[in-house]
Image (cartoon, rainbow, N blue to C red):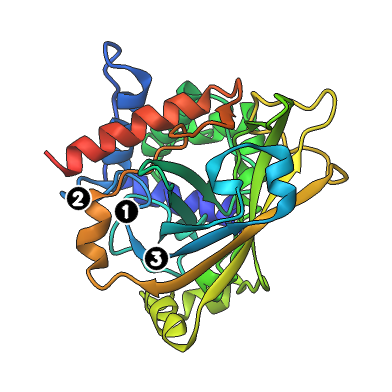
Amino acid sequence: MMKRNLLAALVVLGCAFPGAVRSEDEPVETQIVDAMNKLFGMHPGYRANHAKGIVTEGSFRASPEAAALSRAALFDGSTIPVTVRFSNSTGIPNLPDGSEPANPHGMAIKFHLPDGSDTDMVINALKFFPVSSGADFRDLLLALAASPPDAAKPTKFDQFVASHPTVPAAFATATTPDSLADEEYYGVDAFVFINEAGERQAVRYQMLPERAVHLDAADAAKQAPDFLMEELPERLKRGPVTFHLKAQLAGSGDSTKDPTQPWPADRKVVELGVLTIDKAVANSAEAQKALLFLPGQLTDGIEPSDDPLIDVRDGAYAVSFSRRNP
């Protein structure tokens, strides 16, 4: 579990790249990527975060309930081709899959719509986000980089966590799965569905496997360095993997702008459809370099909420993309 032990591991990683100093003249999105590059190192051709991953292909088919919530084309009940990238956390491309800093694992989905356009969904294994703004996320990364093991107590990181208790609480929700196919993935940002009648409903996504299986930290650490990235293609050779896409519906008074605040567990959850993964892309290492997933790349029937992190994530992902594809 990512509590003090995983946070400490991230600090150690950060100590390899000390001195993360942001340029006050740059947009916060650029400052975030700069901080990641300082913390995790510069790895040409790789993402600043979630550097290690694997690309797969499959399809999505919506449920009738989805069309009642949103008029989006991906929810019309037809078979929608998808490209899906699974990944480890951090910007370190050779990070062992079972190491605690590899959590939370991510899933990014590109839905290829009938009109030739795409809409994206970028989710991960955190049930809620550790901070509520781009500036706080930047400062979290900088605090990690400024807190080597020999730093005086309280370290910059200790001070940050003391004023942001959602940081350890959020990361405690993610542990190592036995397979990327057996992980639960969540959308920490809220989006707004609009149906044919113009009715609006704020939602947060859930992508749930047929079964969720996780390892304790000791067992995870014993696994081969690439066990997750190697297991999924082998599993797909034996047959498809399926996930259930669901939407948790916001109730009255639920915050849509603060991703650190999970909605109550008793909020209604609606099945949106089934995601089927058929195969791993043969040239995954090359394919993922050209893929840019943006949480804010939406289609008619889905709109961003007032969560400021949606725009920040879009900007930071674009900066990271430009650096790995100069």
Residue extending farthest top:
25
Instruction: Decide if residue 240 is on the left or right side of residue 274.
Output: left
Look at the numbered discs 3 and 1 and tell me whether their residues touch, using CB distance below 8 Å.
no
Residue extending farthest left:
326
Look at the numbered discs 2 and 1 and tell me whether their residues touch, using CB distance below 8 Å.
yes
- Of mark 2 and mark 1, the one earlier in the sequence is 2
Which residue lies under the disc numbered 3? Answer: 57
- Of mark 3 and mark 1, the one earlier in the sequence is 1
Instruction: Decide if residue 262 is on the left or right side of residue 14.
Output: right
Instruction: Decide if residue 238 is on the left or right side of residue 252.
Output: left
Q: Answer with the quarter of the image where residue 214 lies.
A: bottom right
Query: For the C terminus, which image quadrant?
Result: top left
Q: Secondary structure at mark 2?
A: loop
Which residue lies under the disc numbered 1? Answer: 51
Q: Nearer the viewer, residue 48 or 20?
A: 48
Compared to 154, does 283 lie above or below? Answer: below
Separation (CA) of disc 2 from disc 3 = 26 Å
Q: Answer with the quarter of the image where residue 34 lies.
A: top left
Compared to 239, does 197 lie above or below? Answer: above
Which residue lies under the disc numbered 2? Answer: 43
Where's residue 61, x and y in %?
58, 59
Q: Secondary structure at mark 1?
A: loop
Look at the numbered discs 2 and 3 and tell me whether their residues touch, using CB distance below 8 Å.
no
**Residue type at mark 1?**
Ala
Where's residue 74, x and y in %?
54, 47
Query: For the N terminus, which image quadrant?
Result: bottom right
Q: Nearer the viewer, residue 198 or 162?
A: 198
Compared to 232, does 61 lie above or below? Answer: above
